[in-house]
Image (spheres, helix red, strand yellow):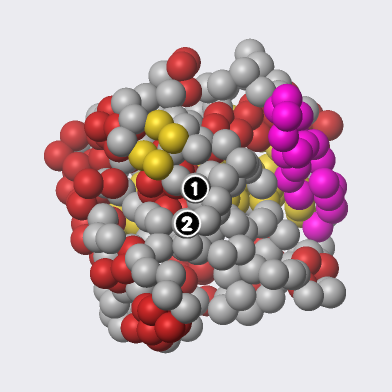
């Protein structure tokens, strides 16, 4: 696959998707006290797999409830709506959201080796439009939607919230509905492609040793894979894929939570986005987690999950 400034081949080493999802992992994520609508197909792009989401809505409710759209991570290369990071206690994320009286929709989107940027933005916006179109049937409040993602999902959450350009809506799935959101939680997402270090410079030493032992050399950069085949020239693609270049004064409020010891996506990425949002006059809160690596490894993730839930619930009340 080639594009202006990018050449990515199937032989390029790099991130490898997990080999399997063990039996029971997906089921362990299902929250109690919730109605489940699993594998809802929100778009069927030509030539690709159907795109699906799982929706959980609190059983105990008196009317339509706000909805949190969860966007999984995985370097845009892998990951699934079926499970948050392995390090997090199974079921903790979705259960915390349900316990707060909010619905949660966990979505899939096309990975970067399936389709180039901006397909991932198109897909996420299509999922939001789908949920809005069928909100009455699903028990959702159309005026209170939020996005929450981690790593690559945090990056996509920021882009979806910030980009207000019809060209980035895409044509997949439901059209004619708004993809706007009223709050964002971004866990350690990329903010600027040009200030991200090379993956080899940030990967754990044991990964480097393993690649060297296999004679594979430096892996292809995930951002380069994401942009290979993009319809935009190289420099324009790197600008458009960077949330800092879409910041606007009327952006929805942001909560940025990032491990201060993150070795894959440096804490400075969230500092940069936070500063840009504040300079533009938008609402932004930045929380650094001391000692936490990527996915909050080395610390307890539960306080950060609770922080994200509390932030969204508070913003939905405003």
Residue labelled with disc 2: 12
Q: In the picture provided, is 92 more to the left or to the right than 138? A: left
Is 138 displayed left or right of 312 in the figure?
right
User: Observer-nearest residue: 81 or 112?
Assistant: 112
- The image quadrant that residue 128 belongs to is top right
Residues at badges 2 and 1 in contact (C-beta under 8 Å)? yes
Task: Give how far across and how far down residue 270 sits, in percent.
Answer: 28, 56
Q: Nearer the viewer, residue 210 or 223?
A: 210
- Numbered disc 1: secondary structure: loop
- The x, y position of residue 13, in whole percent, is 47, 62
Up-down relation of residue 155 to residue 236 (above or below) = below
Check residue 54 in the rendering and tell me which mark sits there, or answer none: none
Q: Which residue is mark 1?
A: 9
Residue in view at x 40 percent, y 63 percent = 219
The crowding category of the residue bearing disc 2, from other C-alpha atoms within 10 Å (few below 14, some 14 to 19, many at least 20), is some
Start-end of magenta stretch: 34-54
Describe residue 50's horizontal placement relative to residue 206 as left or right.
Answer: right
Compared with 269, 115 (above or below) is above
Q: In terms of secondary structure, what is the magenta stretch mainly?
A: strand
């Amino acid at each position: 696959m080639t594009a202006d400034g990018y050449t990515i081949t199937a032989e390029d080493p790099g991130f490898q998707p997990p080999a399997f999802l063990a039996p029971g992992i997906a089921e362990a994520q299902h929250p109690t006290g919730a109605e489940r609508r699993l594998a809802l197909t929100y778009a069927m792009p030509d030539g690709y797999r159907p795109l699906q989401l799982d929706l959980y809505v609190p059983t105990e409710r008196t009317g339509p409830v706000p909805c949190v759209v969860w966007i999984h991570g995985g370097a845009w290369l892998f990951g699934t709506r079926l499970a948050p990071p392995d390090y997090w206690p199974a079921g903790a994320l979705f259960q915390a959201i349900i316990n707060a009286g909010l619905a949660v929709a966990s979505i899939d989107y096309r990975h970067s080796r399936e389709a180039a940027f901006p397909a991932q933005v198109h897909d996420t916006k299509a999922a939001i439009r789908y949920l809005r179109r069928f909100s009455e049937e699903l028990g959702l409040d159309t005026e209170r939607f939020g996005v929450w993602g981690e790593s690559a999902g945090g990056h996509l959450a920021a882009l979806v919230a910030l980009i207000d350009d019809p060209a980035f809506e895409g044509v997949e799935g439901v059209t004619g509905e708004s993809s706007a959101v009223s709050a964002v939680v971004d866990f350690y997402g990329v903010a600027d492609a040009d200030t991200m270090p090379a993956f080899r410079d940030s990967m754990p030493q044991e990964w480097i040793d393993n690649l060297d032992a296999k004679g594979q050399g430096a892996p292809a950069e995930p951002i380069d894979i994401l942009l290979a085949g993009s319809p935009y020239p190289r420099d324009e693609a790197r600008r458009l894929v960077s949330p800092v270049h879409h910041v606007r004064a009327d952006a929805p409020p942001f909560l940025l939570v990032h491990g201060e010891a993150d070795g894959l996506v440096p804490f400075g990425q969230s500092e940069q986005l936070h500063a840009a949002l504040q300079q533009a006059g938008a609402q932004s809160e930045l929380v650094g987690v001391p000692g936490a690596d990527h996915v909050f490894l080395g610390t307890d993730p539960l306080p950060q999950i609770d922080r994200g839930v509390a932030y969204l619930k508070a913003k939905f009340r405003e």
